[in-house]
Amino acid sequence: MPEAIDVPARIEALWRTRTLPVDAGVVHVVATWFDGDCHRVIRIEPDSPKSDADFFALNLTRARADIILTTGQILRDEPELEYALPDAWSDAMTAWREAALGRTAPPKVAVLTSGRGIDPEHPAFHGWASPVVLTSTDAARALRRDLPAHVRVIGLPSTEPRDVVATLRADGAKTIAIEAGPSTARALYAEPSIVDELSWSQYCGPDLAHELRGRVVFPESPDAGTLRQTAPAVTLEESSGKWRFSRHVRTPPG
């Protein structure tokens, strides 16, 4: 169980700043391992390497968001996944969300899905973040019958990730947290990239069990594109080994 925290102090310790943008655009939060050639996501399993700082970065990104964008595949892979702040951090993060960002209501969690294998009882539909399902117009009709009445189901003309993000932005979302798998994330990094900020946790262990090695998330180093690292990375020794933490933001045009 994480201990109570001073949110700005933890932000400063991790990213060497005490303030973050109120409206941050598209924010991708991810934990990876480098296999010598590529950065691979770490699959979430009981034996996955754990990091308190990575857990903080993930929950802080949720606390910053207007909308958290995830996928039906994530919900199928993680049947116990909750979109709620940890009990010990909830009061502090909620207060920080209101004071620093002016956001008084919880975020929405938007599940991008084909409709296949969606469990109406999944915790994602019954937590802190208000649930929304984004799907095709055809699948929307069936899902409205199958999901609880409090889950808003939206049929979209296109469920391509970039089009979905454009729809969320047009609907007023100023900070969109991306908690999706590598396929969805890579679509957002494709040129021209629409990722405005990256919260990057890197597990630096010399090896990672094969079953924990996910797919490649970046076609190359993020800083080779439109992102720049905001400060030197912070390296911490966690219970699972060494981790490196960095924050990257879109390079201003010109």
Image: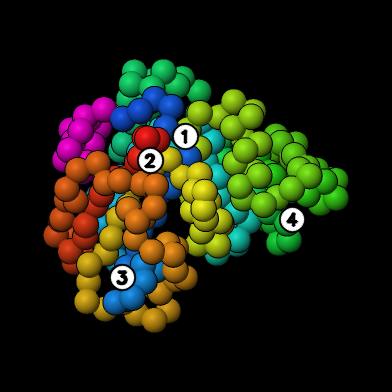
Q: What residue sits right under mark 4 in the picture? A: 115
Q: Residue 63 placed where, x, y %?
A: 40, 34
In the rendered structure, which amino acid carries the disc numbered 2? Answer: Arg
Viewer-nearest residue: 147 or 248: 248
In the rendered structure, which amino acid carries the disc numbered 1? Answer: Gly
In the rendered structure, which amino acid carries the disc numbered 3? Answer: Phe
Residue 108 appears left or right of 209: right
Q: Quadrant of residue 113?
A: bottom right
Marks 4/2 in contact by CB < 8 Å: the verdict is no
Using the numbered discs, state the Cα–Cα distance from disc 1 to disc 4 in whole angstroms: 27 Å
Q: Earlier in the sequence, mark 4 or mark 2?
A: 4
Marks 1/2 in contact by CB < 8 Å: the verdict is yes
Marks 3/2 in contact by CB < 8 Å: the verdict is no
Q: Nearer the viewer, mark 4 or mark 3?
A: 3
Q: Is residue 86 visible?
A: no
Using the numbered discs, state the Cα–Cα distance from disc 3 to disc 2 in whole angstroms: 23 Å
Q: Earlier in the sequence, mark 1 or mark 2?
A: 1
Q: What residue sits right under mark 3 in the picture? A: 34
Using the numbered discs, state the Cα–Cα distance from disc 1 to disc 2 in whole angstroms: 10 Å
Using the numbered discs, state the Cα–Cα distance from disc 3 to disc 1 in whole angstroms: 27 Å
Q: Nearer the viewer, mark 3 or mark 2?
A: 2
Mark 1 burial class by Cα count in 10 Å: few <14, some 14-19, many 20+: many
In the rendered structure, which amino acid carries the disc numbered 4? Answer: Gly
Q: Residue 141 placed where, x, y %?
A: 85, 46
Q: Residue 137 placed where, x, y %?
A: 82, 46
Q: What residue sits right under mark 2 in the picture? A: 250
Q: What residue sits right under mark 1 in the picture? A: 25
Mark 3 burial class by Cα count in 10 Å: few <14, some 14-19, many 20+: some
- For the record, the magenta segment spans 1-19
The vertical placement of 188 against 20, above or below, is below
